[in-house]
Image: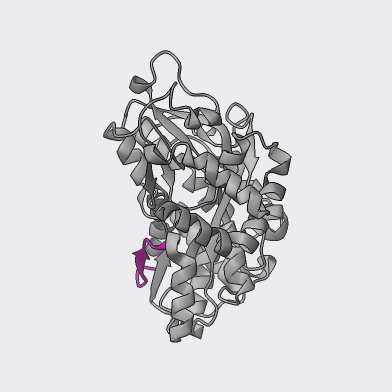
């Protein structure tokens, strides 16, 4: 009965959205995401439930979200858009939108209202940071550390990352400037509210890189979100940055001697963009899927598998226990009051404007 009600509700939602009939929709979608625990949460929370409703649809996953901007640019130049729906961080969504590579949409037309009837534009609210960005989750980039490698003095301050005397050993940092530059300036005495003003100047960029220079020889650079959890599990690093959901997995699901350091965690948003220029049948299928995958229940369900906060206000009260571990998920969310005492809010629009230039400077610094 419950499945029948869900099917009826989904059919009604599709009709409300003015989507094409099933026979007018493509029977295959290529979804682009990040792999690992996050992608598994997407599969469990809405891809598999969608396939149960639409067994004729084949869903192919591509784990290239960290290269989404470059690859969509290349697909557009070649006139061959092979991706149907792409999971990206907010700053990348802004870049893709500005370049005309992502489709603009009307939230109240494309997305389902909340379970309480709240229009999608209100339910997602300020998290719709771009005309092309369809929010899914709030997550953070933060640090995990080996509890058996820090003695009786576990790190609890972001600047402990730069303290090689108190915490000798290798660290891991993402192989890109975002977050690393901000943390470097914070630990070089720049006030939180001044970070982006300073980083906008060549002098500020050099200041950040000079601070990173102090630990550069002790850094293992990562590109995939799975790298830091594996390095921690193998004992190759004393601490490292990654997505909080990845750390949740290595701590709670794998039982490794790892703990979280939440100080100066960087809040970020993740969500979908629909590539501009999809054929009508592929676009119709994607719209149908997105409406289902971003409704109140589906986003709440995702929090059963990973410690990321749902982007809909109406989903938050539905967050319960982990689907397999049975533990309460709320205390593991980056937005939990105990974890968010000192957060850093990433400036998405700033990075959308400065990313290409600072990327080039950062990569040149890495190569030295």
Q: Position of residue 81 (x, y in %)?
A: 44, 80
Q: Is residue 153 above or below residue 233?
A: above
Residue 92 shows in this picture: yes
- 113 magenta-colored: no
Q: Position of residue 300 (x, y in %)?
A: 53, 46
At x 52%, y 58%, the residue is 361
> In terms of depth relative to the viewer, which is nearer, 319 or 222?
222
> In terms of depth relative to the viewer, which is nearer, 308 or 147?
147
Residue that protrudes farthest toward the left in the picture: 234
**Left or right of 257 in this view: 74:** right
Q: Position of residue 197 (x, y in %)?
A: 72, 49
At x 53%, y 80%, the residue is 20
At x 32%, y 29%, the residue is 256
At x 46%, y 29%, the residue is 260
Q: Is residue 6 above or below residue 226?
A: below
> In terms of depth relative to the viewer, which is nearer, 306 or 246?
246
Q: Position of residue 349 (x, y in %)?
A: 67, 58
Magenta span: 53-65
Residue 9 shows in this picture: no
């Amino acid at each position: 009965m419950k499945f029948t009600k869900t099917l009826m509700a989904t059919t009604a939602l599709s009709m409300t959205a003015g989507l094409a009939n099933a026979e007018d929709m493509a029977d295959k979608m290529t979804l682009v995401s990040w792999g690992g625990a996050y992608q598994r949460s997407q599969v469990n929370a809405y891809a598999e439930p969608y396939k149960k409703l639409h067994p004729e649809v084949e869903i192919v996953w591509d784990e290239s979200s960290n290269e989404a901007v470059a690859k969509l640019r290349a697909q557009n130049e070649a006139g061959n858009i092979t991706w149907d729906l792409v999971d990206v961080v907010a700053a990348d969504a802004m870049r893709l939108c500005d370049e005309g590579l992502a489709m603009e949409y009307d939230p109240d037309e494309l997305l389902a209202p909340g379970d309480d009837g709240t229009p999608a534009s209100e339910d997602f609210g300020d998290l719709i940071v771009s005309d092309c960005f369809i929010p899914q989750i709030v997550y953070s980039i933060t640090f995990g550390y080996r509890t058996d490698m820090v003695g009786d003095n576990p790190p609890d301050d972001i600047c402990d990352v730069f303290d090689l005397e108190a915490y000798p050993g290798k660290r891991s940092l993402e192989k890109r400037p975002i977050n690393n530059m901000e943390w470097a300036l914070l630990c070089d005495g720049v006030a939180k509210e001044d970070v982006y003003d300073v980083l906008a100047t060549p002098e500020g960029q050099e200041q950040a890189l000079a601070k990173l220079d102090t630990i550069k020889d002790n850094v293992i650079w990562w590109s995939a979100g799975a790298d830091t959890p594996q390095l921690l599990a193998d004992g190759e690093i004393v601490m490292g940055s990654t997505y909080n959901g990845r750390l949740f997995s290595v701590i709670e699901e794998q039982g490794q001697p790892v703990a979280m350091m939440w100080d100066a965690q960087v809040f970020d948003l993740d969500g979908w963009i629909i590539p501009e220029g999809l054929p009508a049948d592929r676009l119709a299928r994607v719209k149908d899927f997105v409406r289902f995958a971003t409704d109140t229940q589906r986003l709440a369900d995702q929090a059963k598998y990973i410690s990321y906060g749902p982007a809909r206000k109406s989903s938050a009260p539905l967050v319960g226990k982990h689907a397999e571990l049975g533990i309460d998920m709320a205390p593991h969310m980056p937005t939990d009051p105990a974890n968010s005492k000192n957060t850093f809010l990433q400036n998405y629009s700033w990075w959308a404007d400065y990313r290409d230039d600072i990327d080039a400077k950062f990569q040149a610094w890495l190569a030295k």
